[in-house]
Image (cartoon, rainbow, N blue to C red):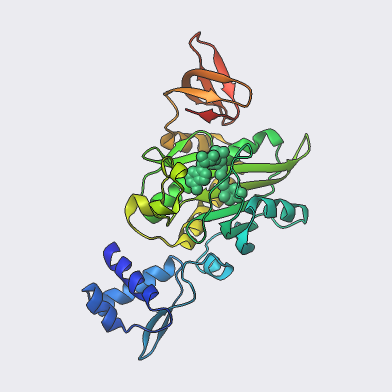
Amino acid sequence: ASKIRESLLAALSSAEDSYFSGQELADQAGCSRTAIWKHIEDLRASGFMIESKRKKGYRLLGKADELNENNLLVGLQTDRLGRSVHYFESVDSTQKIAHSLAQENAPEGSLVIAEEQLSGRGRMARSWHSPKGTGIWMSLLLRPSLQPQKAPQFTLIAAVAIVEAIEKTCELKVDIKWPNDLLIDGKKITGILTELQADSEQIHSLIIGMGINVNQCAEDFSDEIRKIATSLHIESGKTFSRAGIVQQILLNLEKYYHIYINEGFEPIKVIWEKYAITIGQHITARTFNKEIKGLASGITNEGVLKLIDENGETHLIYSADIE
Ligand code: BT5
């Protein structure tokens, strides 16, 4: 079935502005017109805007996979997250824009999303490669009334939401590497960057930056990044609707955010552990001022990593690079 979908999308997007009759599409795909109609409905449900006109046939509207407001809102099932979309063709960093929106009192759930980032960033001033039109580069604004110490938990909440969204929309299995990496077969598919504006007592705004490699081919990565990174396309050979994935992430995030606010971190922790590969392994954790080797024995109810060193001493790691 996904073959038919692929061939349909390929045909529709090859013909910039002209129509394809149901019969033509059916002949190409080797199935019935009813099947084509069903697949068109499915594509619409995953966010593609396809016009159908009597006697003419089907036509893809606009650039199907643009992440503009229209494409993101058609089919979005959330109540609050992603209801206000700030879409850009090109930005420095969606984080930067989300920070200024936060100061301008933008509502909770506001989403900044761009086709391309010129200086996308990772943790500790590292850069995030964000080539045009291929991935999902977005920042979500939340305003939980919590103490700032809770902020790192949102990285883990987002990780679970994204893993499950990729599983559902792309049928690919993804692992979580504490704290902020998602991997497929050991290669990085997603990075998460949680930042906040807060005083010592209270979070004012929390900005979850998510970078997801979707439709890149290997050539889209630099030599250096190609060694450590992958995309959903590279892993499956398929091309995905980015908007459909964004919608599923937002829906999952809304669900887990709600659970977190009402029941705390523990239910999330249980799900997180299912996907985590770090736990139970001997690792080296590099923090900004030291390096600790040991066994990653689990995370606390706060989402902090527990590391047991060779002397049997337990260290609590709040943030680090893991090897
Ligand atoms: C991260 O940092 O993984 C967090 C990345 C967050 C990116 C999003 S995109 C939307 C929002 N706006 C932003 O400006 N940022 C957020 P870290 O754990 O420090 O990992 C950074 C490292 O990942 C780099 O040093 C590279 O080695 C690698 N890397 C860079 N670009 C990559 C990519 N596209 N895919 C996989 N790995 C990449």
**Total tally of numbered discs in the picture:** 0
The residue furthest front is 223
The quarter holding residue 46 reads bottom left
Q: What residue is shown at x 34% (from left), y 70% (from top)?
A: 10
Q: What residue is shown at x 76% (from left), y 56% (from top)?
A: 105
- Is residue 318 something that shows in the picture? yes
The image shows residue 315 at horizontal and vertical percentages of 57, 18
Q: In which quarter of the image is ligand 1?
A: top right
Q: What residue is shown at x 45% (from left), y 38% (from top)?
A: 176
The quarter holding residue 57 reads bottom left
Quarter placement of the N terminus: bottom left
The residue furthest top is 311
The residue furthest left is 30
* Residue nearer the viewer, 156 or 269: 156
- Is residue 263 something that shows in the picture? no
The image shows residue 214 at horizontal and vertical percentages of 44, 54
Q: Is residue 52 above or below residue 126?
A: below
* Residue nearer the viewer, 182 or 96: 96
The image shows residue 32 at horizontal and vertical percentages of 23, 77
The quarter holding residue 206 reads top right
Q: What residue is shown at x 27% (from left), y 82% (from top)?
A: 24
The image shows residue 187 at horizontal and vertical percentages of 41, 40
Question: From the viewer's perspective, is 124 left or right of 308?
Answer: right
Q: In this view, does 235 lie above or below 9?
A: above
* Residue nearer the viewer, 236 or 203: 236
Question: From the viewer's perspective, is 119 left or right of 58?
Answer: right
Question: From the viewer's perspective, is 223 left or right of 158?
Answer: left
Q: In this view, does 158 lie above or below 114?
A: above
